[in-house]
Image (spheres, rainbow, N blue to C red):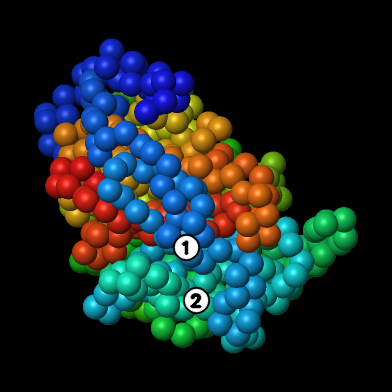
Amino acid sequence: MDTDTPLIARRRLLRAAGFGLGVAGLGLTPVGRLLARAGSSTQVHAGYGPLKPVHDLNTGLPLLRLPEGFRYTTFGWAGEALAGDIACPGKHDGMGVVRADGAVVTLVRNHEIGGETRGSFTPAGATWDPDCAGGTTTLRFDTAAGRLLDARPSLSGTLVNCAGGVTPWGTWLSCEEIVLTRGQVLDVDGATHTMRQSHGYVFEVPADGLSTAEPIVAMGRFKHEAATVDPSTGIVYLTEDGHRRAGFYRMLPNVPGEFLRGGRLQMLAAEGAPDLRRGRRQGERLKVRWVEIEHPDQGADDASPTRDEGVVAQGVAGGGSVFTRLEGCIYGDGRVFFTSTNGGDAGCGQVWAYAPGSETLELVFESPDPQVLDYPDNVVLSLRGGLVICEDSSQPVQRLYGMTAAGGLFEFCRSDVVLDGQGGFSGDFRGAEWAGACFSPDGRWLFANVYTPGFTVAITGPWRDGLI
């Protein structure tokens, strides 16, 4: 690795720290131990070895640095033709594998498009608001041949489709990270624009065909980030990316698996802890209850500075606890793990774990310094026992990190995306965030998105147990 990379300072701090979490004594599940060790590890793992420039099998360009033996291909670039000769939108964000048919995997990918007026890129039946250009594309990738088979639009007329989550029955929940009200007038590209529909919803996208573009009102109208489903109950857990205050929610469906038939939205309330943004103790456990959100569709609140706190304001009025900027949300081992991007006393991130069985909330990890962990985003569990961590920071070069089952941190992939007219794009994109990391069901392929200029990578190689 280069001696001047930001990871070197992180290494020194990790080696010197030994934060005394007592990970083994916390009684955490395997996922919990992995997350906790992000702050307690005293060593950086060698991982798969040094990184070197590797040429893209699709374009021939050296877009990534990877360890020896790993290869990749890019696909689904912004501007490329989708089925129906529609240009692929950009701003590639959250993504998940929703189906596997032998070697062919189906991915649904978000496009976090906001203030643009070109309008929907799907047919009317799959469009929520015809003037809006956000949505999802669905891609089929042949892992045996290592190539894209086809790509098509699947949902549009939405706005700022950020993250989401895969359901146990093989669909994708695409979440809008914005709250706007029907009839609201905005200034877009120097012109006034009136919203035809309200926004701030979750939409379900099937593996086949088109979404019905019906908002799941019972999941609330707020700045949604991610969603995850408890397969044993069908309960959906949801995070909110509120910069001033945010809630952690659950939706109890009237009929598990049939979200459009309604349900109850509730916000978490930790006993004796109305504010979880700062001043918490790593390792502490809190009993929780759930506060009813009587009006989940009441997303706007003119009394709040940002006008988008209608749901969280209801929860707070009922005794709900506030977080800050909740992002990733993962169900595993009987717990729901979720991240607060800028939570904690140092403002560089927290990892929380909610246990439905005991109705407890635990602060699993809080970063004491940005060089340990800064603004945690998506984390994806590998079949081999490690984690992949997407970086979305202010660093000039963004990376995919790996964390071993023993807690060692290593750099797995580094962006080297500098373009000179290729695909119609020019510039240095090494600082663009990574997003949407997910594995094929057999664990052989890691998919991830480079947000700007917008493309997906599929990485494969000599994976080893205990790493990622």
Q: Residue 371 at what x, y percent from top left?
A: 42, 23
* Along the viewing direction, whichever of 291 and 119 lies nearer the viewer: 119
Q: Which residue is found at the position 63% from the left and 82% from the top?
A: 85
Q: Quadrant of residue 283?
A: top left
- Disc 2 crowd rating (10 Å Cα; few below 14, some 14-19, many 20+) is many
User: In the rendered view, does 331 fall on the left or right side of 390?
Assistant: left
Q: Quadrant of residue 66?
A: top left
Residue 456 visible in the displayed image: no
Q: Residue 52 versus residue 432: which sits nearer the camera?
A: 52
Up-down relation of residue 459 to residue 246 (above or below): below
Amino acid of disc 1: Asn
Q: Could you say which is closer to the camera, residue 88 or residue 363? A: 88
Residue type marked 2: Ala
**Residue at 31 percent of width and 41 percent of height:** 67
Mark in front: 2 vs 1: 1
**Quarter of the rendering occupied by the N terminus:** top left
Q: Secondary structure at mark 2?
A: strand
Give the numbered dot on residue 58.
1
Say whether disc 2 or disc 1 marks the residue closer to the N-terminus: 1
Disc assigned to residue 151: 2
